[in-house]
Amino acid sequence: MPGVTFRLFASIYSRMANEDNIIIQRVLSGDTQKFGLLVNRHGPALMTFVGRIAQQQEDAEDVVQNAFVAAYQHLMDFDPQ
């Protein structure tokens, strides 16, 4: 069963990565509203991760927001490899 679980996870991750690459290309082409799709997709997991480290909810929210702002500002440097 572990091999099946790993293959399923790898397949889902690969599909999500491909979809993320398409979204990023759309954002870089001028459809900046599409960046919200990335925030909606990855924000909850990032918030959960940071929330376990940060002592205050507000601090976690600030860290996550700053991460997405930095990601947006450096989107031109994105290398899908």
Image (spheres, rainbow, N blue to C red):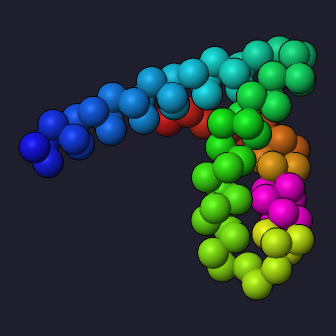
* Magenta span contains residue 63: yes
Judge from the rendering whether residue 81 lies leftward or rightward of residue 74; answer left or right: left
Residue range (magenta): 61-67
Spot occupied by residue 69 in the image (x, y as percentages of width and height): 87, 49
Q: Quadrant of residue 61?
A: bottom right
Identify the residue at image location x=22%, y=35%. 7
Identify the residue at image location x=27%, y=33%. 8
Image quadrant occupied by the N terminus: top left
Q: Confirm whether residue 53 shows in the render.
A: yes
User: In terms of depth relative to the viewer, which is nearer, 41 or 68?
Assistant: 41
Judge from the rendering whether residue 5 lies leftward or rightward of residue 52; answer left or right: left
Judge from the rendering whether residue 13 lies leftward or rightward of residue 37; answer left or right: left
Looking at the image, residue 33 lies above or below residue 2: above
Spot occupied by residue 76 in the image (x, y as percentages of width and height): 78, 35
User: In terms of depth relative to the viewer, which is nearer, 70 or 33?
Assistant: 33
Spot occupied by residue 73 in the image (x, y as percentages of width and height): 87, 44
Q: Confirm whether residue 70 shows in the render.
A: no
